[in-house]
Image (tube, helix red, strand yellow):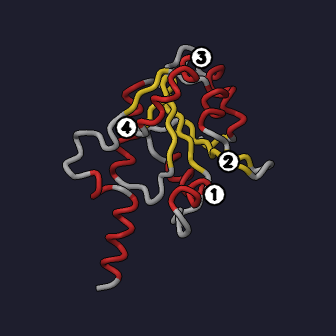
Amino acid sequence: MIIDYKELVEVRDLHPGKKIVFSDGVFDLLHVGHIEHLKHLSELGDLVVVGIMSDAWVRGRKGNGRPIMGEEERAALIDCVRYVHYTVLLNDLEKKERVRTTEALALLRPDIFATSDSTWSNHGKELKTLGVELKVAERVPPNIATTVEDISTSKLIKRVQRLNSI
């Protein structure tokens, strides 16, 4: 179910006693690495909530030409994955600005925040204050028989570009 970020505060009340896991990402050009990540999240808890980074954030981080798919398309795809219970755009449409992951965490107060970004280890005190356990996962779960480069969105884009130039 796709929800507005303001509805995150209600999720815990709607699911008492459930272990909630939150993760966020771009999820541009959905691939097997994304699916394995989402599957891994479902193994960490009872309820999986996934934040989708705003188009503006993606452009700022990855450059012009990204994302390939808009935030609403990316949210719709992630929402169809069976491991995901709630999908939320990390974008405040009224203020026309992105919603920071820390804001989403403060509203949702999940049991676990799972990320592949090791820099989140620097936020330990803030996460502890929110009662959120940090799980820094490998970028690609070990059961994928390929390299990280082979299944990243950036590498997929380069592969398509190479094939298109043949």
Q: Position of residue 143 (x, y in %)?
A: 22, 40
Q: Earlier in the sequence, mark 4 or mark 1?
A: 4
What residue is at 31 percent from the left and 55 percent from the top?
151
Q: Foreground: 35 or 148?
A: 148
Q: Is 136 rendered above or below residue 36?
A: above
User: CA–CA distance between discs 4 and 1?
Assistant: 27 Å
Residue 97, percent from left and from top: 72, 50
The amino acid on which the numbered mark 4 sits, given as a three-letter code, is Lys
65 over 12 or under it: above or below? below
Location of mark 1 (residue) = 56
The answer, for residue 72, to whether it is visible in the render is no
Which residue corresponds to the image point at 48% horizontal and 38% vertical from the top-left? 84
Q: Are marks 4 and 3 in contact (CB under 8 Å)?
A: no
**Amino acid residing under circle 1:** Ala
Are the two marked residues, 2 and 1, in contact with CB atoms closer than 8 angstroms?
yes
Q: Is residue 74 above or below residue 85?
A: below
Residue beneath disc 2: 98
Q: Secondary structure at mark 2?
A: strand
Say which residue label 4 marks: 39
Residue 100 in sight from this viewpoint? yes
Residue at 36% x, 34% y: name it: 137
